[in-house]
Image: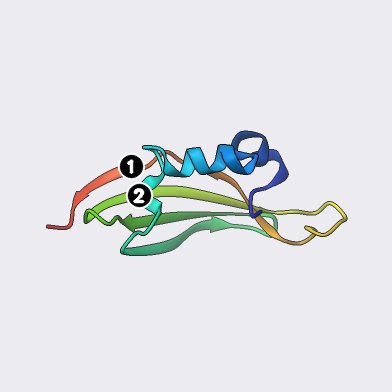
Amino acid sequence: EFAHPNNQKNTGPLNKFKTMIKGKSYRMLLNHLDHKVVKIRSNDLMAIFEVTVLDKDKVYYKFNWTVEKYTTKGPLQDCWLTTMVSAPMPLGSSI
């Protein structure tokens, strides 16, 4: 629902997204213990964030998360939608 239509080609439909989010690359996002979001840069139409996640196994991962403002007329107009999430970058254990 929050993926940019251009990104939905990679992430959708819902069953494909479920498989992706539960897979090795993104499962650390599910039921994570903590997260930190830092804005890297932004303008009126795009923003890039560095997202650090502490997963349930107490391992840190970093992602670059890009969102874009959807400008096409319709129900999503002016919504910020995900256009890209990088592969996770392991940062090591918290212990």
Q: Is residue 42 left or right of residue 54?
A: right
Amino acid at dot 1: Met
Measuring 65% from the left and 39% from the top, which residue is drawn there? 13
Q: Nearer the viewer, mark 2 or mark 1?
A: 2
Measuring 35% from the left and 56% from the top, which residue is drawn there? 52
Residue position for label 2: 28
* Res 16 → quadrant: top right
Q: How is the image coloured?
A: rainbow
Label 1 sits on a secondary structure element that is strand
CA distance for labels 2 and 1: 11 Å
Label 2 sits on a secondary structure element that is helix
* Res 10 → quadrant: top right
Q: Quadrant of the N terminus?
A: bottom right
Measuring 49% from the left and 38% from the top, which residue is drawn there? 19
Residue position for label 1: 89
Q: Is residue 7 left or right of residue 32?
A: right
Point out which mark residue 74 bears. Answer: none
